[in-house]
Image (cartoon, grey):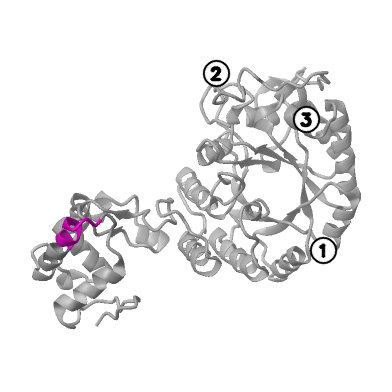
Amino acid sequence: MLTTSDKTNLLEQSSYRYTLQDVEEPNLYRDIYNYDDVPKVAFNHRRVPLNMPKDIWITDTSFRDGQQSMAPYTVKQIVDLYKLMARLGGPYGIIRQSEFFVYTKKDREAVEKCMDLGYTFPEVTTWIRASKKDFKLVKDIGIKETGILVSCSDYHIFKKLRMTRRQAVDYYLATIRDAFDAGLVPRCHLEDVTRADFYGFVVPFVNEIHKLSEETGIPVKIRACDTMGYGVPFTEAALPRSVAGIIYGLQHYAGVPSELLEWHGHNDFYMGVANAATAWLYGCSAVNCSLLGIGERTGNVPLEAMVFQYASLRGSMDGMDPTVITEIARYFEDEIGYEIPPNTPFVGENFNVTRAGIHADGLIKDEEIYNIFNTKKILNRKPGVAVSKTSGLAGIAYWINQYYDLEGDEMVQKDDPLVMELKEWVDEMYADGRTTVLARKELVAKINELRGGAPLKGGQSGSDDQEVK
């Protein structure tokens, strides 16, 4: 049978209808996932066409998946971060939704306070256990959409749930009906999709969901969950690890439109960001992230990373305010006490800091030489240098100019006496066996000493314990 595709406007065969393969033994893909070996990446040389949706967006799981890997946030912290996220996402809702727990009194208080703010975006959604009691709880709060877990690999179906595939499908469909009865839009989390029998279970199951959705007139969202981070973005990679293949199959053989399709990835193999971008490129509208990538094990896809992936792919921030990313990072450190690894892109202390003197010399001449973009404009963070044994005169001069906001004629040069005296002191420190970079407080104290209290002009008043005069 031929039908005209709404996406390609071409005649396509629609006779492929995969039926559930209710196997007696689980398919664990032992040729790929031999537990005693590193998982293998297989290729089948089948190319999936690029298919970027007209609209793409970000969803957040900081208050659900993120809270599963650190001390729970306080209600105030959740509300503060939600406000920052709304500012970051901008007026067009590029950060479309944020997902919350509702199990405890504190969880529900946070949800209610965030909803009371009246923001259109991010929309507050939930993640709950598959029970009628929880569905009613969500409905009573005023939530319109909730996530429910529908594990889809045989690892989970056979080993965790102790069911057959048919039993699992029947159980999941009954749960979805309960969500419909409660007046909720269900978001089905296809847990462990990158170890699932895609055409033997996933596609037939999603087809049954689609049929149920058509009968009730209620849309069902599908979240493809790379729970263990096994997904790969490589062209012509084979299932079950191919991100492009998963997105293509869900659209082409299970009829899931882009706007109802979401990718949720983990970073166990350093592929989180690449996989999320690949999901966008091949037809998925939403990618699910968490602030700073905080999540189970190695974490989720960092939300701030996908802000920049969005801008790279679309050529515009589309109303997002990336300077808020720096505020979020400071909030995590100052208010929550979370230590951000210093080399973390966009938010780490050293992300736009160089330690090499030759690099600092380049920064002085033109910061574009060694800075990834205008970090002052985009993230409200000037590029910096760390003073160490390799900084040289150029690095020390750059540090002074940056810290004291010296510009134009006020800037010190490499041959300035202050720079040269400070360089001698730095060399002495490392000659005595020092191995760590010099802290701001140490440098400020030494500069005050060398200048005898004479002021350095510029905008930096200093915030260290040692007063800058």
Measuring from the top left, give residue 164's x and y in whole percent.
Answer: 85, 26
Image-based side of 382 in relation to 277, left or right = left
Q: Amino acid at mark 2?
A: Phe
Residue corresponding to mark 1: 141
Above or below, 442 against 269 in this view is below
Q: CA distance from mark 2 to mark 1?
A: 47 Å
Above or below, 358 against 450 in this view is above
- At label 2, counting other C-alpha atoms closer than 10 Å, the crowd grade (few under 14, some 14-19, many 20 or more) is some
- Considering only order in the chain, which callout, 1 or 2, is on the residue closer to the N terminus? 2
Whether residue 210 is visible: yes
> The N terminus lies in which quarter of the figure?
top right
Q: Secondary structure at mark 1?
A: helix
Q: Residue at x 77, y 25 (%)?
A: 201
Q: Is residue 431 magenta?
A: yes
The prevailing secondary structure element of the residues shown in magenta is: helix
Q: Secondary structure at mark 2?
A: loop
Residue corresponding to mark 2: 43
| Residue situated in front as seen by the camera: 415 or 298 | 298
Above or below, 17 against 6 in this view is above
Q: Residue at x 63, y 40 (%)?
A: 263
The magenta-colored residue range is 426-434
Q: Secondary structure at mark 3?
A: helix
Q: Is residue 6 magenta?
A: no
In the picture, residue 213 is in which quadrant?
top right
Residue corresponding to mark 3: 159
- Considering only order in the chain, which callout, 2 or 3, is on the residue closer to the N terminus? 2
Q: CA distance from mark 1 to mark 3?
A: 35 Å
| Residue situated in front as seen by the camera: 46 or 43 | 43
In the picture, residue 454 is in which quadrant?
bottom left
